[in-house]
């Protein structure tokens, strides 16, 4: 599958890391555009200078580690599209230009099914997608989550559980499913 990741999926570090590692493990492809990365940087700016610096560093790492994941599209394509929020047209344009199968987003209302259907696209919630990956290969996804938890706890000097981490990352169903698999 080929997915276009919306800004709201890339900006939270835990969600992005889990999603990208899970997709890589299933040989799925994930794409974005420069405009999506610019939105991420602009959103992080609201967190202050440190937030902006961290986002820009993460964007640089993302570009280095996923070198073929940037989709270019024409302004004409973007302007020809309609979505309830016209500021999201660039996401749809990138998905169309990249011949993606779906857009991964938390923003359901601005990507209506009837509009996406016209372009052969689906809208996918990241929590549901990770749950699908979990069903296919729970060992791999649980290992990714455990490594992510260790890294986050070390960096933040915290003692979070997997469930706490994933709920904070706006992945409540995944948190429940993985906790059940680990704790029984």
Image (cartoon, rainbow, N blue to C red):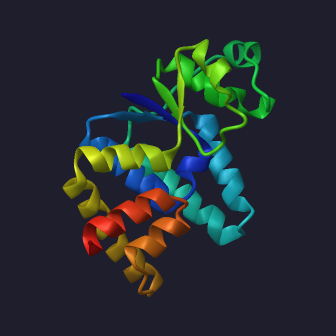
Residue at position x 35%, y 43% in the image = 132
Whether residue 167 sits left or right of residue 106 in the image: it is: left
Residue at position x 54%, y 17% in the image = 97
Q: Quadrant of the C terminus?
A: bottom left
| Residue 176: quadrant of the picture | bottom left
Instruction: Between residue 28 and residue 65, name the one nearer to us.
Output: 28
For the question of whether residue 65 can be seen, the reply is no
For the question of whether residue 19 can be seen, the reply is yes
Instruction: Between residue 109 and residue 61, name the one nearer to us.
Output: 109
Q: In the image, residue 83 lies at what x, y percent?
A: 75, 25
Residue at position x 49%, y 46% in the image = 126
Question: Does residue 88 lie above or below 100 as drawn?
Answer: below
Q: In the image, residue 116 lies at what x, y percent?
A: 61, 21
Residue at position x 46%, y 23% in the image = 100
Q: In the image, residue 172 lies at what x, y percent?
A: 50, 61
Question: Does residue 150 lie above or below 108 as drawn?
Answer: below
Q: In the image, residue 89 lies at what x, y percent?
A: 71, 26
How many numbered marks, from 0 up? Answer: 0
Q: Quadrant of the N terminus?
A: top left
| Residue 114: quadrant of the picture | top right
Instruction: Between residue 83 and residue 17, name the one nearer to us.
Output: 83
| Residue 53: quadrant of the picture | bottom right
Farthest front residue? 184
Question: Does residue 49 lie above or below 26 as drawn?
Answer: below
Whether residue 175 sits left or right of residue 45 in the image: it is: left
């Amino acid at each position: 599958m080929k997915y276009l990741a919306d800004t709201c999926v890339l900006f939270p570090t835990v969600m992005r890391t889990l999603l990208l590692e899970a997709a890589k493990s299933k040989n799925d492809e994930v794409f974005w555009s420069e405009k999506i990365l610019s939105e991420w940087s602009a959103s992080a700016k609201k967190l202050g200078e440190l937030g902006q610096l961290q986002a820009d560093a993460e964007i640089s790492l993302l570009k280095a580690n996923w070198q073929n994941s940037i989709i270019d599209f024409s302004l004409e394509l973007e302007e020809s599209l309609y979505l309830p929020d016209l500021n999201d047209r660039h996401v749809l344009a990138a998905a169309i230009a990249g011949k993606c199968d779906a857009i991964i987003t938390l923003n359901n209302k601005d990507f209506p099914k009837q509009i996406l259907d016209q372009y052969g696209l689906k809208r996918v919630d990241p929590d549901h997608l990770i749950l699908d990956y979990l069903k296919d290969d729970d060992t791999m996804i649980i290992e990714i989550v455990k490594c992510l938890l260790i890294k986050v706890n070390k960096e933040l000097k915290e003692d979070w559980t997997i469930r706490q981490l994933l709920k904070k990352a706006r992945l409540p169903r995944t948190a429940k499913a993985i906790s059940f698999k680990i704790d029984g």
